[in-house]
Image (cartoon, rainbow, N blue to C red):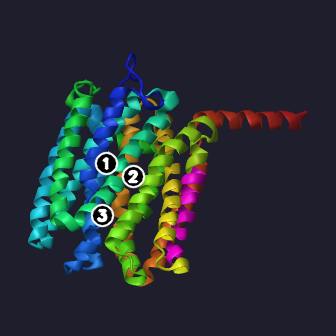
Amino acid sequence: MKAIKGTKRGLFGLPITMIWGYLATMIFMVGDGLEHGWLSPYLIEQGFTVQQSATLFMAYGGVLAIASYFSGVLTEAWGARKVMVLGMIIWLIGHIAFIEALQSINYSVMLPTYALRGFGYPLFCYSFLVWVTYRSPGKVLATAIGVFWAAWIAGLYVIGSYFPAFMLPKIGHVGLLWSAVAWVLVGGLIGIYVVGRDTGAKKGNPKEKFKSLISGLTICYENPKVAIGGIVRTINTTGIGALPIFFPLYLSSEYGFSTEQWLQVWGTMWLANIVFDIVIPYVSDKWLGWRKTVMWIGSFGSGVMTLVLLYTPQVFGGNFWMMTLAGVFLGAALTGYVPITAIVTSLAPDKKGSAMAVVNFGAGLSYFIAPAIVGAFIGSIGVEGVMWVFAILYFISAFLMRFMKLPHEEKQKQKENAFIDKDQAS
């Protein structure tokens, strides 16, 4: 796959075609995210336990992790369009079946059908992201990825939070779930049209394509830094992915926050994230550098702000605006993780799809680990203990970034060491 040449440029010098793809991603993710902020409290109202809710999200996250891994290598083997079509169809089947199971309060059917949805958005969105990484000029690669995540977050968390907050009183929970079908269909069809026949699939026999499927595993052995990048990407969304499972219940029971207020806090946090999702990668490309951005703004910053989010209601009580402000700072800190994709793919320039498979797997795996931590520890160490677990994970992420030096950083270090040795010898 090659960068798009000879096409009209739009925002930040990115091709107009790519920008339409970002719009498709945003619309698709609105449909996928309409229930994320309120499903857990709703299930509790229907008589389910926090552990059952966590198990539902854990099953979803496990399937999502598998789909996230295969999205990268399948895109190289089959092309983006085929994988995106497959993702949209699987999502629609799983979602419609889940709605029917939810209406009958049949947990044994809800579990596999909600998990099936986990195949959908990674195959659709992450395949498009692979397409973006191959077609973006190197000088704006982090920016191109940042805009993708801005679109992804705008759909999943911003519109996916404000739309339910506004529409819940009007069409109810089940009505919202049915509206998601329309969002996914519109976004899916636009995205498939944008990619068109320009899929970039590799030609080769079945044996070669099978090798591409396992290349995401072998590359971790060949290049350990790619594996470390996958771990960092997993930590990135582990803490934040767990919040909707238990934090709105905590705010409601302890400080009187309503579901609508929580959705507004959640949506505003991600609205701030979108603004910084464009600014921070640009600063990273131009001045700070990718690795330091992930280390200090993303990892260390997210750890600190997770604790700020925890202690804000303890200090200010049920103050909606202080809670919103804490959310805004956490949303800003999370944008520091955006360059991790650019770092990992730059470490394997000839195997970007395989490297992306590792990054995508980490993103998906976080949605399995997050509810697993909640289910395992919420009963023993409570909300405060669980939040500290996630904060510590972010600090571990900052430490791991010490080992993620890019080739030019390694060369610079070697030059500095050679200069010091020469100076000492003289």
Cα–Cα gap, marks 3 and 2: 30 Å
| Mark in the foreground, 3 or 2 | 3
> Residue 240: percent from the left, percent from the top?
42, 62
Left or right: where 235 falls relative to 190 = right
Q: Which residues are magenta?
A: 295-313
Residue at (43, 81) in percent of width and height:
255
Task: Identify the residue at the far top of this view.
Answer: 6
Residue type, numbered disc 1: Ser
Q: Report if residue 309 lies within the magenta region.
A: yes
Instruction: Confirm or deny contact between disc 2 and disc 1 (CB under 8 A).
Output: yes
Q: Earlier in the sequence, mark 3 or mark 2?
A: 3
Q: What residue sits 26% from the left and 42% below the top?
A: 124
Closer to the camera, 293 or 39? 39
Q: Which residue is mark 2?
A: 362
Describe the element under mark 3 as helix, strand or loop.
helix
Tell me: residue 379, above or below residue 119. below
Residue for badge 1: 68
Taking the image as shown, residue 365 lies to the left or right of residue 426, namely left
